[in-house]
Image (cartoon, rainbow, N blue to C red):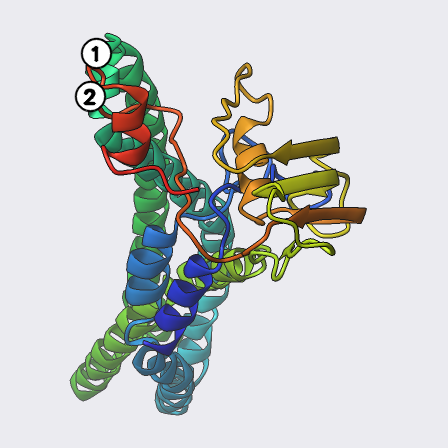
Amino acid sequence: AGLASVVFEKAMCLPVGSAPPDPTDEQVPGYMDQNQKPNVVQLLNVDIIECWGYLLKTMVYMIVSPCVTVVLFVMLISKIKLAGLMGVLYIIPCTITTMGFMRFNIRSWIRYQGYQDERLRWLTETIIHIRTIKSLAWEKMSFEKLHKVRTKELEQNQICGIVQGFAGAIGHTMPWGTMLIAAAVSLRSEGYLEAHTIIIIQRMMGSLLTVTSLMLAGAHKFITVPNSFRRIRKFLAEHDLPQDVVRPPALMTPDAPVVHLHGSFSYVDGKSPTLHDLDVSIKQGEFVAVIGAVASGKSAFLQTVLGELYPVDEAFVEAPMPGKGQIAYCAQVPWIFEGTLRDNVLLSSGLVA
């Protein structure tokens, strides 16, 4: 609950937009492999609730299970001597193979969650802008993009399931493989195997099978929890909204502009600017249209007006009453197609400068 609260509070402190991925950050090679910001819904539902739920109980099992396994192996060796030792040696290749499968599965799980983030992000955008998609006949394009990401997600999920199945199958062969090897060596060396010894070995194998099941159930946590911690850490490392960027002008006059931008501004403090050499003054009651091509910086400009970008060097944002009044942020996609600009921006309310 505390971790979920921290993630939620962090999401409330993030700006509307986000900076492009930094090429110096840790990257996972491949298409959409978690190089973007993790989805906050996925962080709460999967990375916290599913991965961290019952984690303490699982870790206790993982700590106790090897100790119980060692005790059972010692009892087996003391009971049938060399045959028991030869049977225990079967554990070594099984463990090495299982660890190899787990290492491979970690990368597949990272890709799976990356595709899942992208699929949910695109699905959310589609639901929100369904009217726009239908009016512009973009249903096929939207479906193809969603289907492509969903296919990649299912492929990685299938790989994870197959690899985990192989690792589980190998793990479950350890008790029976140990028993068969021990019985075979005992029969070959001594020529017989007492009935009560077989019963004791079978009981030990049952206990080993139970312990192995607990360890395999906990082994999945070694795949999901480190990646979950990495995603949460990456999300919490996102830059917060800059504080106190908008300042009152040095000289207050009745005809002072409602906002004055000057200088260059950046998404990330200390990084190269996103908007260069602005010098914009908007007067009281003035109606301003921000027009430009895709990715030309319209949203970044509006974020600068709201004080959500960091000033570079001597840049500043001045407004007579920062933090007061009403601000309308017009989305790039209109909701009311048959309505006027006032209907879409102000929702038929009065204009307040």
Q: What residue type is labelled 2?
A: Arg
Q: Residue at x 46, y 46 (%)?
A: 110
Q: Of residues 27 and 1, which is closer to you in this image? A: 1
Circle 1 — which element? Answer: helix
Q: Of residues 267 and 103, which is closer to you in this image? A: 267
Mark 1 neighbour class, 10 Å CA radius: few under 14, some 14 to 19, many 20 or more: few
Where's the C terminus, which quadrant?
A: top left
Residue 130 placement (x, y as % from top left): 21, 24
Residue 264 placement (x, y as % from top left): 75, 38
Mark 1 → mark 2, Cα distance in angstroms = 6 Å
Residue 281 versus residue 12 in the image, above or below? above
Q: Which residue is drawn at 61% across and 41% down?
A: 257
Residue 297 versus residue 254 in the image, above or below? above
Residue lying farthest to the right in this orientation: 313
Q: In which quarter of the image is residue 335?
A: top left
Q: Mark 2 points at which residue?
A: 131
Residue 314 placement (x, y as % from top left): 82, 48
Cβ–Cβ under 8 Å for marks 1 and 2: yes
Residue lying farthest to the front in this orientation: 254
Residue 63 placement (x, y as % from top left): 42, 84
Circle 2 — which element? Answer: helix
Mark 2 neighbour class, 10 Å CA radius: few under 14, some 14 to 19, many 20 or more: some
**Tag shown at residue 135:** 1
**Tag shown at residue 341:** none
Q: Of residues 278 and 271, which is closer to you in this image? A: 278
